[in-house]
Image (cartoon, rainbow, N blue to C red):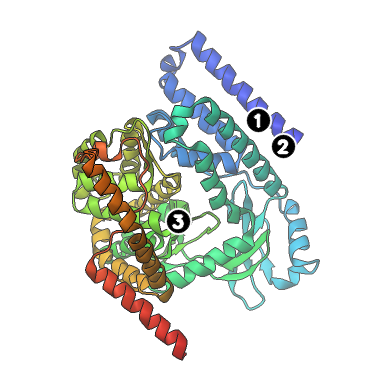
Amino acid sequence: MSGGRGRLLMRILAQLAGQEAARAVRPHQGLVNGQGSGAVRRARDLRDALERLGPFYIKVGQMLATRPDIVSQEMIDEFEKLQDRAAPAPFTQFEPILTEELGPLWRSGFRDIDTGNPLGTASLSQVYRAQLPSGRQVAVKIQRPGVRETVAADMKLMGSLARFAARRARRFNEVIDVEAMLSVVFDAMRPELDFVMEARNMTEAAKAAEDFEYIAVPEVVRATPRVLVQSLAPGKPIREADRDAFSAEERAAIGRDLLAFMYRGFFVDRVFHADPHPGNVFVHPGQPATLIDWGMVGRIDRPMSNSILLLLLNLAMNDGAGTARAWIDMGSTTSWSNASAFAGDMAALVPQIATASLEDLNFGVTLTAVLQHSTRRGIRTSPMVSVLGKSFANIEGSIRHLAPEISIIDVFSEELTGIVIDLVKESLAPQQAVRTALEIISAGAAAPQQLRGVTRDLSNRDLTMRMTLNDAVRGARREPALSLGAAEVALTLGAALLWRHQSRTG
């Protein structure tokens, strides 16, 4: 870490320590001045510190806002307010970046660029309105000088601190793998430091958006690692939009398509916008909603995606026990897990979620509140849940500004058939069919040995059956199981044979 960065961190930590010492000496001073309790003031001070430290710490704080199992409610309330905003810097600081990335004649690529009034300012970049020689309006995003090195140093420091904490809080780390959680944040943030990667994300998202009437993604005009030129999103951020300027039908259609688009990212493409907060969704009457800022993107594998799908399906069916099983499948159990008690927790919580609209329920926060129960019951949650929870809470908050009457579960139920059809098509792809066939063959080869073991246990009277959910999972990590019926086996083998025939005759 650079000396200046290290001094800033130490200065902020010293200031936090001083504020905490002052509260210890005068614990009631804040209440007298109307500043709230000590916990509220502590959370507010910490939020201010994260904002001053910059983008990486802001992202970590935003993740923690979805983790009630790690931080207090006062901190959640404050961390939800975290915004990556920065004071506008003079254009002279960014012009060298344009010269280095686009060449000394970069101005010839634009008819005009408004260098005096940036469209947006953040700790990572600054955005300007410009006009191409053709007259087309575009947005020019320029990375702040030196920010890549700063964020890299912050990531390295936080990774070291996470490893240090894990060695000294083993029970905590058994259910909350802080290092793995930070690794997910690192992976999601990397495209924000390389605009070529962000442009690639936008191009992929634009293809996915073609299936949605009310969703658009900006077109990439030009991209280098530190400069991104893209089409200008019409309208204004959804949080500033006048609801009365839209018809009720248009508002509902935009809200439904925003949710449906996110569901496709979670369950079909397995790539999703990880930061769709109200400032990143632009709307205008008569135009589709435009999702901007594709620097932070989440990517999940098939097992995790399927577990999330089952989780939402069980929520839609008002099934608390099924929700508990799906949640456990997303992570694992520990040596001290109490899964049956967790199932009881879900039986009490799920009915509150199943039928509520956004007017009645903060679904994203409620979903992540499951973490409080799972952590208390010794269930280790996947580190991806932080990014997923943040994405879910953000898109929910965005839609609430325009169409609060929408029910997330209702839209999920409407989209479920299309999602399942896409998953079936994927499962019938030749490579997937061959893989499944090989798994069946492997399972069949192991069956005689497993049968001999069961027979031996029966003869020795050592085989016991445990029927409760708690006994079934306590003390053992859950592993994905191969579960196929006769129809699935026949379909899989048939697809494999068809692929083999096509390969030979093609």
Tell me the amino acid under the disc marked 2: Met
Q: If the image is split into quadrants, where does the N terminus sit?
A: top right
> Badge 2 is on which residue?
1
Give the number of the disc on residue 401.
none
Percent across and percent down for residue 217 are 48, 67
Determine whether, in the image, residue 156 is placed left or right of residue 472. Answer: right
Q: Is residue 127 above or below residue 328?
A: below
Q: Is residue 54 above or below residue 309?
A: above
> Badge 1 is on which residue?
9
**Mark 3, secondary structure of its residue:** loop
Q: Which mark sits nearer the N-terminus, 3 or 2?
A: 2
**Mark 1, secondary structure of its residue:** helix
Percent across and percent down for residue 132 are 65, 73
Quick one: 480 or 289, which is closer to the camera? 480
Q: Is residue 417 above or below residue 122?
A: below
How far apart in space, not on screen, are marks 3 and 1 (Cα)? 33 Å
Percent across and percent down for residue 134 are 63, 78
Crowdedness of circle 3 by 10 Å Cα count: few (<14), some, many (20+)? Answer: some
Name the residue located 45 percent from the left edge and 91 percent from the top edge: 505
Asked whether residue 106 appears in the rendered view, the answer is yes
Quick one: 375 or 290, which is closer to the camera? 375
